[in-house]
Image (cartoon, helix red, strand yellow):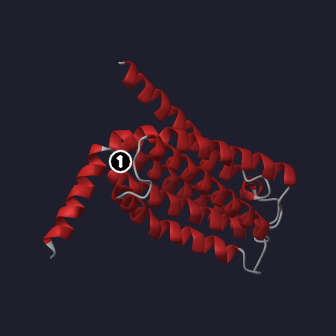
Amino acid sequence: MNPNWAEQNLQTIRTLMERSAVYRHALAPIMILTGLFGITAALVGLFLHIGSARLFVAYWMTVGLVTVAGGFLLIRKQALKSAEPVWSPPTRRVVQAMLPPMAVGLFAGLLGLLPMNSRPADAAGIVILWCFAYGCAVHAAGFFMPRGIKLLGWLFIIAGAIAATMLLLTSHDYPSGGHGSPFDVFFDERGLFMGSMFGGIHLIYGIYLYFSEKGKNAA
């Protein structure tokens, strides 16, 4: 083993742990921005009445890309303000930890764009996989951040498990995947699940981070 490589990794991990509180403070505006994007996208989707599963997946993948771009610009602004490099070794560690599950989510979305079945239940299955993948990605990032990030990841994983159970229970009664299923109503053009999870949960968590950090600074 290269001693320099081991020393660099140890220094990177130490830096991540030392800056965990800083990252927690920086996460607040990112989470709030993500939440606002998610809620706005859900409302726009409701107005557009997106009925096709492929359009649903394409729409939310676009929303995800816009959100990632917005988060990156916000991170870049914070890094420039702190006179730190954007692509620092600690940042690379976090991205590397999140990359595998995020790649799974991206692959699932790309599969949803293929000309296959276009029922609401098809989009629901991809959304469930997105929940699992995103939850795993956030949980992986939590190893370099405070405990609350891991809990957020578990929240998405549990929500995905509950949604998967709902899908299995309702698919037997509504094999056609029509609008009669309560699950289809939740997932079809309204995008309520996406708005509540990827919008509402992020917004609530971001507000919590903002005021908890503000209270610490005041103390």
In the picture, measured across the screen, residue 123 lies left or right of residue 153, that is right
Question: In the rendered image, which quarter contains the C terminus?
Answer: top left
Visible in this render: residue 68?
A: yes
Q: Say whether residue 173 is visible.
A: no
- The answer to whether 2 is drawn above or below residue 138 in the figure is below
Q: Residues within 10 Å of mark 1 (few under 14, many from 20)?
A: many
Residue in the image at 33% along x and 52% along y? 144
Disc 1 residue type (three-letter): Met
Question: Which is more toward the observer, 197 or 165?
Answer: 197
**Along the viewing direction, whichever of 170 and 105 lies nearer the viewer:** 105
Furthest toward the bottom, the residue is: 115
Residue 79 position in % (x across, y down): 45, 46
Q: Residue at point 32% right, 44% down?
A: 19
Q: Secondary structure at mark 1?
A: loop
Question: At x 67% / y 63%, what residue is drawn?
Answer: 61
- Spot occupied by residue 8 in the image (x, y as percentages of width and height): 22, 63
Going by the image, does 199 lie left or right of 219?
Answer: right
Q: Which residue is mark 1?
A: 145
Q: Relative to 147, say whether 172 is above or below.
A: below
Q: Is residue 127 above or below residue 32?
A: below
Q: Residue furthest right?
A: 48
Percent x, y of residue 42: 74, 49
Q: Position of residue 23 (x, y in %)?
A: 40, 44
Q: Quadrant of residue 32?
A: top right
Occupied quadrant, residue 20: top left
Residue pictured at 38% horizontal, 57% vertical: 88
